[in-house]
Image: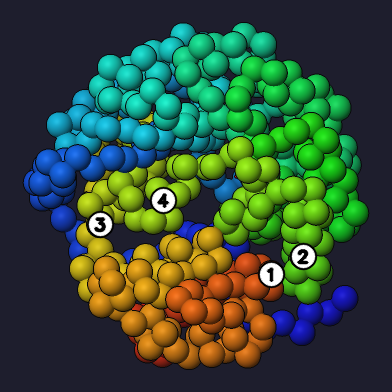
């Protein structure tokens, strides 16, 4: 099938942030500490993200910041040292997300060192949502029990697909049946179990995606993230294969969404479906510009209207004594724009809230994009809200970036061209 589409399909929320980058102001860390000190007095709560960049996998599609495990204990100690640098400015933690790489490539002792250290440093609320990412091939009985003991209550397993042929294309290590066995066991150990699945993978048909979802639903998975495959030139798959026409990807997405909704799952953000139990509180912080403290190599946080980035490799991170990150402040006048673009992840923006909080008229600021989206059937303007339809949810990251470009650059500037992780 030849695609008629000429519009850029952006697949990642990172793509919606590119238009903001040229407008950010570089600040030093003390400037941010001062701001946080003020906010801490108001009793601000936050989310914690810890990046574990290690992974022994060689997946053909992986776009994440990762490296083979080495000096892992030193790395964990460096993360804990960084945590201490923040403790006077950031203490109450409502949700923790440990992501990677594959965090379970740390030994049980290192995982214990990490969790104990974080609890000593911050006040992690007793009912905090504590998520950790893993992959089936590394999920041993010992690790599962250790994680549960350490208080991890939401396990996120990267499955991608259960289909043996497609798993081969993706370079996954374990077989589909082994993954199902591990999920059934994890189901007994963790209060919340979520999985990542991919669509628009080379050779994958619509029915293959439904077959994956059927297994997920049948296993009683609480949250299902369904990502379109990003064909990055950095990956083997991106160099070897053309992505399927966008019309085919859209059809798969529509079908998957209605399958999950028919089976009692709610579409809670662009890529995530929940059976009602999985609240995914961490993503709520991220998409509402709440405080997210990122720790570790490659981690990006968002604190007091600033992005905080870190050294990209564990070696540089361990070596660099100034670990607390590089600060980029979002100028006050574009905070409401960033907020609207982040809310798009949920498929709805509250018109009244932007007006009340910032006196920002979003219908005027994004007038052209909104009109085009309404004409295409991607958006509906309700009483106090704009909402995306199913087609709109498929295009949501593109729509977010189009809104940003319209408002920040009048839709014209060269800097305002849409950029994606798939660009060279
Ligand atoms: C840190 S990884 C998951 C944990 C674990 N390392 C694993 O692979 O099972 C987070 C998720 O990013 C997603 N991801 C990685 N590369 C991607 C790509 N090229 N396109 C879309 N999603 C991707 C995958 O769904 C993956 O599960
Ligand atoms: S997808 Fe996961 S297991 Fe595969 S290389 Fe990336 S981080 Fe490692």
Residue shown at 45%/42% (left/top)?
282
Q: Is tag 3's residue or tag 4's residue first in the polypeptide sequence?
A: 4
Q: Is residue 186 visible?
A: yes
Give me the disc on residue 286: 4
Q: Residues within 10 Å of mark 3 (few under 14, many from 20)?
A: some
Residue in view at x 73 percent, y 18 percent:
185
Element type at marker 1?
helix
Local crowd size for mark 4, using a 10 Å CA cut-off: few (<14), some (14–19), many (≥20):
some
Q: Secondary structure at mark 2?
A: helix
Instruction: Find residue 218 and report its horizontal and vertical position in percent.
Output: 83, 35
At 25% from the left edge and 57% from the top edge, which residue is drawn?
A: 305
Q: Position of residue 148 (x, y in %)?
A: 55, 16
Question: What element does badge 3 sit on?
Answer: loop
Q: Nearer the viewer, residue 260 or 411?
A: 260
- Mark toward the viewer: 3 or 1: 1
Q: Which residue is mark 3?
A: 305
Choose the circle earlier in sequence order: 1 or 4. 4
- The residues bearing labels 3 and 1 have C-alpha atoms spaced at a distance of 31 Å
Q: Is residue 289 above or below residue 418?
A: above
Few, some or many residues within 10 Å of mark 1 (<14, 14–19, 20+): some
Q: Which residue is mark 2?
A: 254
């Amino acid at each position: 099938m030849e695609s008629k589409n000429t519009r850029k399909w952006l697949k990642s929320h990172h793509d919606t942030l590119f238009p903001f980058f040229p407008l950010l102001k570089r600040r030093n860390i003390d400037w941010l500490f001062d701001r946080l000190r003020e906010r801490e007095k108001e009793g601000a709560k936050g989310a914690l993200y810890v990046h574990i960049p290690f992974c022994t996998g060689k997946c053909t599609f992986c776009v994440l910041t990762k490296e083979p495990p080495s000096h892992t204990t030193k790395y964990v100690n460096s993360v804990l040292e960084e945590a201490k640098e923040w403790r006077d400015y950031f203490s109450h933690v409502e949700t923790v997300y440990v992501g990677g790489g594959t965090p379970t490539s740390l030994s049980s002792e290192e995982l214990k060192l990490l969790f104990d250290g974080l609890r000593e440093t911050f006040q992690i609320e007793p009912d905090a949502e504590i998520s950790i990412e893993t992959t089936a091939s590394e999920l041993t009985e010992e690790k599962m029990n250790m994680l549960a003991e350490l208080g991890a209550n939401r396990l996120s397993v990267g499955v991608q697909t259960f289909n043996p042929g497609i798993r081969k294309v993706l370079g996954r290590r374990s077989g589909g049946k082994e993954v199902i066995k591990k999920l059934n066991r994890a189901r007994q150990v963790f209060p919340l179990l979520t999985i990542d699945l991919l669509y628009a993978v080379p050779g994958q048909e619509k029915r293959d995606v439904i077959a994956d979802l059927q297994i997920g639903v049948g296993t009683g998975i609480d949250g299902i993230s369904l990502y379109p495959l990003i064909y990055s030139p950095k990956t083997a798959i991106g160099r070897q294969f053309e992505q399927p026409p966008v019309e085919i990807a859209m059809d798969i997405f529509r079908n998957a969404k209605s399958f999950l909704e028919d089976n009692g799952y709610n579409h809670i953000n662009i890529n995530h479906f929940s059976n009602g139990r999985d609240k995914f509180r961490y993503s709520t912080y991220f998409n509402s510009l709440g405080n997210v403290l990122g720790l570790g190599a490659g981690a990006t946080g968002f604190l007091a209207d600033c992005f905080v980035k870190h050294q990209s490799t564990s070696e540089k991170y361990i070596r660099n004594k100034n670990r607390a990150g590089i600060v980029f402040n979002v100028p006050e006048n574009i905070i409401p724009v960033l907020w609207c673009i982040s809310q798009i992840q949920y498929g709805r923006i509250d018109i009244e809230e932007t007006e009340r909080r910032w006196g920002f008229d979003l219908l005027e600021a994004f007038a052209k994009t909104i009109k085009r989206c309404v004409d295409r059937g991607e958006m509906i303007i309700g009483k106090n809200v704009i909402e995306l339809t199913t087609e709109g949810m498929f295009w949501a990251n593109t729509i977010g970036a189009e809104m940003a470009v319209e408002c920040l650059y009048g839709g014209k500037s060269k800097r305002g061209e849409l950029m994606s992780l798939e660009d060279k």
